[in-house]
Amino acid sequence: AGVAFVRLQDDVMMFDQERDRLDAALAALERELAARGLALSAAKTVTRAAADTVAGLLPRGLPAREMFDRVAAAPEAGPRQVRFALARLAQDADGYAVGWMLDRFAERPEVAVSAAAYLATLVPDRPDIVDRLGGLVTGTTPHPFVMLHALRVLTGAAWLPPAVYQMCWSLVADNGAEFYVRQQAARCLGRHASPSAATRLAHLLSSVYDKDVARTVRAALGQLRTRTNLNGVSRGC
């Protein structure tokens, strides 16, 4: 319930930023929280000061590109403001912010999820995004959070750079890697690997000790078998 309220706060700030309506909506959420005996972390709750910052940076009716430019130039802009600006661009499938976002992806892990959600709206029609994300995750070791969300975008892409494909195999077999990154790497393999890889994935089950990762590898193996049995033709790469 707490997470749902945080999302409601975000939606209020995203879609209706008139001062009076914003105040009324936040007050209603606060009353509902109190009635349910819920308390949210200050780090997760939109404060009135944060609401003022959002309303000032992202006034209602501003064109999406102008909104993003304001956020990109504002030192006080945080993850929420970045996410709102990217969401407005995503509504129009506008790739205006792709270059700026990818150039800063690794150094701003706190907004990686926002950037990934935006980039995912433009994939698989933008091979430049696939190439640049591939270079990001196979270059200097990025923050695990960045790796996770970059792989989420790449999982949905029409193709996978060979270096990323090999890296996914290495991650799934690496018991020392972050388990959620290994899980996403397994999902990526399930989406992109060839039928001949099914045997290799099955072999990995005997060496993966994390039960959550093993479950994901098993699901990826099932995806491969399903795709292979569809008219006897694989749609993998």
Image: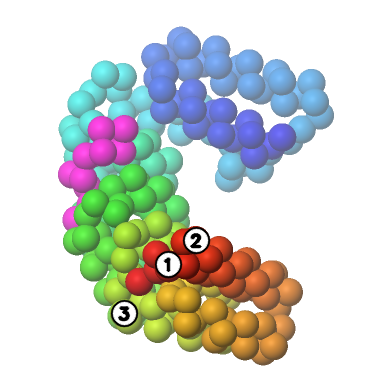
- Mark 2 or 3, nearer chain start: 3
Q: Position of residue 176 (x, y in %)?
A: 60, 85
The secondary element bearing badge 1 is classed as loop
Q: Point out which mark residue 44 bears.
A: none
The secondary element bearing badge 2 is classed as loop
Q: Amino acid under label 3? A: Pro
Residue 95 part of the magenta segment: yes
Please report the bounds of the magenta region as a residue range.
88-99
Q: Amino acid under label 1? A: Val
Disc 3 designates what residue? 162
The answer to whether marks 2 and 3 mark residues whose Cβ atoms lie closer than 8 Å is no
Q: Residues within 10 Å of mark 3 (few under 14, many from 20)?
A: few
The answer to whether marks 1 and 2 mark residues whose Cβ atoms lie closer than 8 Å is yes
Gap between marks 2 and 3, in whole Å?
25 Å
Q: Determine whether, in the image, residue 53 is placed left or right of residue 173.
A: left
Q: Nearer the viewer, mark 1 or mark 3?
A: 1
Q: Position of residue 115 (x, y in %)?
A: 36, 51
Residue pictured at 67% horizontal, 89% vertical? 207
Residue pictured at 39% horizontal, 14% vertical? 18
Residue pictured at 65% horizontal, 72% vertical? 218
For this rendering, which residue is in front, 214 or 104?
214
Disc 1 designates what residue? 233
Against 170, residue 114 (above or below) is above
Q: Nearer the viewer, mark 2 or mark 3?
A: 2
- Mark 1 or 3, nearer chain start: 3
Gap between marks 1 and 3, in whole Å?
21 Å
Residue pictured at 59% horizontal, 72% vertical? 221
Q: Position of residue 195 (x, y in %)?
A: 47, 76
Q: Residues within 10 Å of mark 2 (few under 14, many from 20)?
A: few
Disc 2 designates what residue? 230
Quarter of the image for the C terminus: give it.
Answer: bottom left
Q: Determine whether, in the image, residue 114 is placed left or right of residue 41.
A: left
